[in-house]
Amino acid sequence: MENKIKLITDAASDILHKDYKDIDVVDFFIYDATSDKEVNAKNVDELYKAMIEEGKVFKTACPTIDTYYQKFMENFKSGYATICVCISSKFSGSFNSASVAKMQVLESHPNAEIAVIDSKGNSALEMLVVLAIHGMIKAGFSYELIQININKLIPTGKIMFTVETVDYLKKGGRIGKVSAFVASALNLKPIIVLRDGDIGLGGIAFGIKRTLLKTLELVKSHFHKEGENIKDYDFVVGYSSDINAGENFLNQASDFLKINENDVLFKQITECPAVHTGPNTLGIAFLKKFNLV
């Protein structure tokens, strides 16, 4: 019997509809920060090229209330419950847009089943939340049980990443507690940690090699401190403009953390997060696996 649940996420999750035909992805609007003109890039590599070669800076605007309303209504009229996963509400108005749209639908259709989930994440971490729900739907979990389970899993999630420069985070207004960090001429790199919906500075290191090693040391330290088994978690390694650097980090992470490389998703950071992190970004995210029992 078909599980009558439709899954929606915003594009901050790095989920591509072509990879998951049964996940509906709602796009953000991307603008040139100088001209305020909307950008219609064919793919994220075009954005990175403009950043690197032309010094372009971009900004995003969240999906509209009406966009979510139309999708929620379409699902309801087709006899489906909706679970919608959004980027951390501390980063964007996407969660608020979806929440208002849900209220509008319920005003006229109080029996509609619509769950709007604050992933407390972004990029690869939000992706893990979406894919956990996707797995639960495939496993036949009920609409109610999925919400109970995902609300238990979300606090276990974390992402650690480093950027070439914090300028894009600053310009995008997502610098948060990292604002105290100032990159110096000595090639210091920040290790940025996203947990519980907000970002903070996890540390700094000299040069990219040391920074990535220290990032993995922080991951290992997290599991030791929490007393958790690393094999009970799903992982994503994300890269931005340099796939070779991403593959090297994937290999390094697999070796250092002693996890099978085939069990780690390897994904390019897509347009919405790319605007705020910039080129030459590398990171690793993890979330506890859901229990099939």
Image: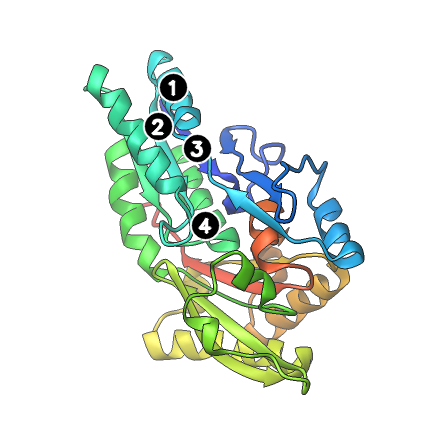
Label 2 CA crowd tier, 10 Å (few <14, some 14–19, many 20+): many
- Residue 175, given in percent of the width and then of the height, sits at 47, 65
> How far is mark 2 from mark 4, CA to CA?
17 Å
From the image, tell me which residue sits under label 1.
75
For mark 3, give the secondary structure: strand
Image quadrant assignment for residue 185: bottom right
Which residue is pictured at 35% across the width and 79% down the height? 225
Any part of residue 109 in sight = no
For mark 4, give the secondary structure: helix
The answer to whether marks 2 and 1 mark residues whose Cβ atoms lie closer than 8 Å is yes
Q: Earlier in the sequence, mark 2 or mark 1?
A: 1
From the image, tell me which residue sits under label 2.
82
For mark 2, give the secondary structure: strand
From the image, tell me which residue sits under label 4.
126
Q: Quadrant of the N terminus?
A: top left
Colour pattern:
rainbow
From the image, tell me which residue sits under label 3.
8
The answer to whether marks 4 and 3 mark residues whose Cβ atoms lie closer than 8 Å is no
> How far is mark 2 from mark 1, CA to CA?
7 Å
The answer to whether marks 4 and 1 mark residues whose Cβ atoms lie closer than 8 Å is no
The answer to whether marks 3 and 1 mark residues whose Cβ atoms lie closer than 8 Å is no
> How far is mark 3 from mark 1, CA to CA?
10 Å
Amino acid type for the residue under numbered disc 3: Ile
> How far is mark 4 from mark 1, CA to CA?
22 Å
Any part of residue 185 in sight = yes
Outermost residue, front direction? 35
